[in-house]
């Protein structure tokens, strides 16, 4: 059994409550190990994968894992879950190993480590060691839809309430890991002062996975063959990842797949099936007020004919 899939009783009493933590809404499952997380010793070749929840973290984690280790250890893909290959640094859920413990036990080089922290929460050793950081962002509308379904099915998350309440909460930043708006902007600003940060977008990855993989390779200093790249692009296609028990989170007992799947739709534009016209107008007005940096642009739809 995977290290992080240890049985947790699936029960809504497990759902955590949101509280303000240094100005960011969080739950205890991501703050209980705060001191160890903040004192985590990064190594110079560590790669930190940073995202706001539901941006495609698992997708980019699988891509980076395959790029680094797919050739030398193909068995990793079929025997070790992605959340053990790429530990979730701040995770501190009862009955499963903490993210810091899993990261400390990693024998790979580089170590791939995931975080959902806003930029100001990242342990200082990552900056001191000048680690590479890959930040993946996804447009707000698809993020909130994905987050809503995730919170419905994940018994460790706060109760989502109905869709309209959830959407309001998202706009107020009352989500685990805080405001989407602050998160994407905070990391975007960091890019201007920290050169080892590769900021990428879910929509671009959907539009042209090969092109985005090439950019990732040049960022992390890898030059796989065309054949390897083609094979990886195939393995990380949504349908293939959804079937892959080492990537689809099917062994995590706090997730109720009868409610929704972790690998749910994997689309750009699914928000159109959730937002009413009035919700969309209200959301757009609020978005304009919050997203004032003209250099940070998101796409909420892409031209399907182009991919
Ligand atoms: P949806 O709920 O919109 O389907 P994270 O890994 O950060 O939790 O993000 C999960 C979201 O990324 C889910 O979005 C999931 O389906 C999507 N996703 C995961 N792998 C994907 C892939 N290979 N292609 C497209 N989307 C993917």
Image: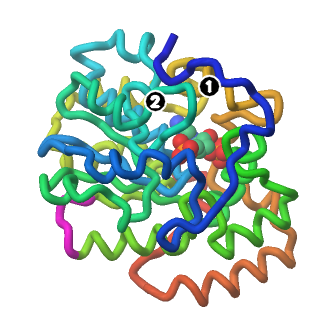
Would residue 302 appear left or right of 281 to someone viewing this image? left
| Total tally of numbered discs in the picture | 2
Please, what secondary structure does the residue beneath circle 2 have? helix
Q: Residue at x 82, y 35 (%)?
A: 259
**Res 206 seen here:** no
Are the residues at dot 1 and dot 2 in contact (C-beta closer than 8 Å)? yes
Helix, strand or loop for the magenta stretch, by majority: loop
The span picked out in magenta is 193-197
Crowding at dot 2, Cα within 10 Å, few <14 / some 14-19 / many 20+, comes out as: many
**Residue 195 magenta-highlighted:** yes
Q: Residue at x 35, y 51 (%)?
A: 35
Q: Quadrant of residue 121?
A: bottom left
Q: Quadrant of ligand 1?
A: top right
Would residue 177 appear left or right of 158 to someone viewing this image? left
The residue at which mark 2 appears reads as: 83
Percent across and percent down for residue 69 are 26, 23
């Amino acid at each position: 059994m995977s290290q992080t899939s240890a049985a947790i009783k699936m029960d809504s009493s497990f759902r955590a409550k949101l509280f303000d933590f240094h100005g960011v809404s969080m739950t205890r499952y991501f703050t209980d190990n705060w001191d160890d997380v903040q004192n985590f010793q990064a190594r110079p070749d560590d790669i930190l994968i940073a995202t706001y929840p539901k941006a495609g973290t698992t997708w980019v984690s699988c891509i980076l894992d395959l790029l680094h280790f797919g050739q030398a250890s193909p068995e990793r893909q079929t025997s070790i879950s992605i959340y053990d290959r790429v530990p979730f640094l701040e995770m501190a859920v009862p009955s499963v190993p903490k993210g810091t413990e899993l990261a400390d036990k990693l024998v790979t080089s580089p170590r791939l480590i995931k975080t959902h922290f806003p930029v100001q929460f990242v342990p200082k050793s990552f900056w001191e060691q000048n680690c590479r950081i890959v930040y993946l962002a996804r447009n707000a509308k698809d993020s909130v839809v994905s987050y809503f379904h995730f919170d419905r099915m994940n018994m460790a998350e706060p109760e989502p309430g109905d869709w309209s309440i959830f959407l309001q909460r998202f706009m107020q930043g009352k989500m685990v890991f805080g405001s989407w708006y602050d998160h994407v902007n905070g990391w975007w600003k960091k890019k201007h002062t920290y050169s080892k940060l590769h900021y990428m977008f879910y929509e671009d990855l959907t539009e042209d996975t090969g092109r985005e993989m090439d950019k990732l390779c040049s960022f992390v200093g890898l030059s796989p063959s065309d054949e390897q790249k083609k094979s990886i692009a195939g393995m990380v296609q949504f349908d293939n990842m959804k079937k892959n028990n080492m990537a689809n989170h099917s062994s995590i007992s706090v997730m109720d797949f009868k409610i929704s799947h972790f690998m749910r739709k994997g689309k750009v534009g699914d928000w159109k099936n959730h937002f009413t016209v009035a919700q969309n107008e209200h959301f757009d007005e609020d978005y304009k007020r919050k997203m004032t940096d003209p250099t940070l642009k998101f796409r909420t739809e892409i031209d399907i004919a182009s991919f």
